Image (tube, grey):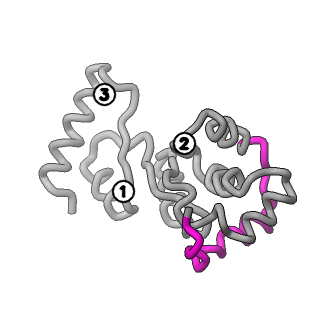
Amino acid sequence: MVGSSLKETWAAFEAALAAGKARAIGTSDFSTHELSALIGLGGAVPAVNQSPMSAGDNLTEILTFCRAHGIKTEGFSTLRTGCLKNPVAARIAAAHHASAAQVCLRWVTQQADAAVVSTSSAAYDKEDLASTALTLTPAEMAELSRQSALTSGEM
């Protein structure tokens, strides 16, 4: 159940939206249960829900729910499952003449609407942006989706 503080906060977001002080309002790391409760308030539906998304995560439930309700999805923490050192990601990256980071980021963006990244250099920013030129095959996507057990090689 949505608590009164969330209800009050969402009402303030809706007021900002209605007053033209915001172009859109959204949520971060809300589960389908929390999104259902928020939608159940009867007001504005979040424009976006940010969620942690990394190769191997099961995103089916949250992505399906958000699509059904017109909520855009945005992934963050895209490299948290050790994708940079994952041999499957490395092999797929080599086949695409790309980096493991690009493959892992693309795994997210081929499913979600967007991804939030933070980098320590302009070169990494350019590398991240270049990931959109990749198209991972359904077999590669499935193989990366099975990588949740391989989390020992974190960044």
- Nearest the viewer among 78 and 35 is 78
Q: Nearer the viewer, mark 1 or mark 3?
A: 1
Please give left or right for residue 62 compared with residue 124 in the image: left
Determine crowd level at label 1: few under 14, some 14-19, many 20+ residues with C-alpha closer than 10 A: some
Secondary structure beneath label 1:
loop
Amino acid type at circle 3 is Leu
At x 63% / y 41%, what residue is drawn?
Answer: 124
Left or right of residue 24, residue 82 in this image:
right
- The segment highlighted magenta reads 132-154
Residue 23 percent coordinates (x, y):
39, 26
Give the secondary structure at mark 3: helix
Amino acid, disc 1: Phe
Q: Residue tagged by mark 3?
A: 17
Q: Quadrant of the N terminus?
A: bottom left
- Residue type, mark 2 in image: Thr
Instruction: Return the residue found at the far left.
Output: 4
Foreground tag (3 vs 2) = 2
Which residue shows up at 19% across the image and 42% down it?
9
Residue hosting label 1: 30
Q: Position of residue 49 (x, y in %)?
A: 43, 48
